[in-house]
Image: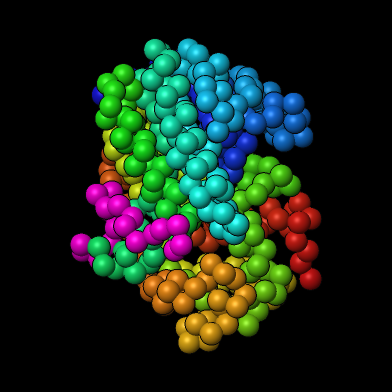
Amino acid sequence: MTEIDKTKPVLVTGATGYVAGWLVKKLLEEGIDVHAAVRNPDNKAKLAHLDEIAAKSKGSISYFKSDLLEEGSYAEAMKGCELVYHTASPFALDVKDAQRDLIDPAVNGTKNVLNSASATPSVKRVVVTSSCAAIYGDAIDTQNAPGGKITEEIWNTTSSLEHGPYSYSKTLAEKKAWEMQKAQSQWDLVCINPSFVMGPALNPKNTTSESQSVLMQMVDGTMKMGAPKLGFGVVDVRDVAEAHFKAGFTPVAQGRYITSGTETDLLEMAMSLIPKYGDRFPLPKKALPKWLLMIVAPLINKNYTRRFIKDNVNVPWSGDNSKIKKELGMEFRPLQESMEDGLQQLIDEGIVVAK
């Protein structure tokens, strides 16, 4: 049981991130003072949206310069905080050197933040943004799990530097967090494990979210011949932020939480946009055959290996989200709402143009 005092500041690392932005908004609206750890506090354009929210909220925001790979750079931001949200982590699927670009920043960044937590006497709880990728590597793993669905008990054992390096980085980073938590008794650890995050960004012109690029490919003609039935879970970004908030302030929160609203696939996601946008964009209406993907996909994108296609296409993804519903009272938005809100934002901002 960890009671967090809402009059104390709360630290959010990577505060300008896709999920973190919505979390900061929620904290500010709840009247909480946010210590926002960012790479460059002088980049006013990147912070303007958070300042705007703070100006209309009961809470306040202060910025602190910090870097995942710079030892001790979170110490100042953490002063006086009982609760730390560690959301900062690299999310890139196309990298040149997986060890350098994904593994090292994810693991060493986690180590750096948690070392500071142990050195800051006020810290009582750390909430880490992990991922369902730390639980499974490919959709086939969810089928092979006991009962045919992943639960919080399971760890990803199929990803590696060569196969699914992003998932491997999330697995190693979360394992490092639990190892460090067990080595001390000052703070407890809660991990939020979202599936694929979709929905509107708080700062759409400055976001680098993979969800935005997936939406773009659905509407720019890339998938007009069809989309693969690539199985995974999807969750709305606003629900992920809510899950973080609840994980921080619910005294009995403990362990890991699968944070996923819908079991779906890439084709179903795209087709959920047809009722509202089908006449304005070349959205995919049929599944690309697996045999064709086996031949073509590896030539288009090196991440789409034959093994990846075999283990993810036409393979339903299944995850058990009952723990977070029961313990944190979470409810999830429907897939269509996340997809439509995400695309509508891109239209409103002029990032995509409907015909």
State the residue in front, 116 or 60.
116
**Image mark count:** 0
Q: Position of residue 320 (x, y in %)?
A: 30, 55
Q: Is residue 4 magenta?
A: no
What is the quadrant of residue 64 in the picture? top right
State the residue in front, 256 or 156.
156
Q: Residue at x 62, y 75 (%)?
A: 300
| Viewport quadrant of the C terminus | bottom right
Q: Determine whether 322 is above or below 191 in the image.
A: below
| Viewport quadrant of the N terminus | top left
Q: Determine whether 270 is above or below 248 in the image.
A: below
What is the quadrant of residue 70 in the picture? top right
Q: Give the extent of the magenta segment.
A: 146-163
Q: Main secondary structure of the magenta part?
A: loop
Q: Position of residue 247 (x, y in %)?
A: 38, 34
Q: Residue at x 69, y 26 (%)?
A: 41
Q: Residue at x 27, y 53 (%)?
A: 154
Q: Residue at x 27, y 30 (%)?
A: 182
Q: Is residue 79 left or right of residue 173?
A: right
Q: Is residue 160 magenta?
A: yes
Q: Is residue 51 left or right of residue 118?
A: right
Q: Position of residue 98 (x, y in %)?
A: 53, 53
State the residue in front, 313 or 68.
68
Camera sees residue 97:
yes
Instruction: Indicate how the structure is coloured in the image.
Output: rainbow
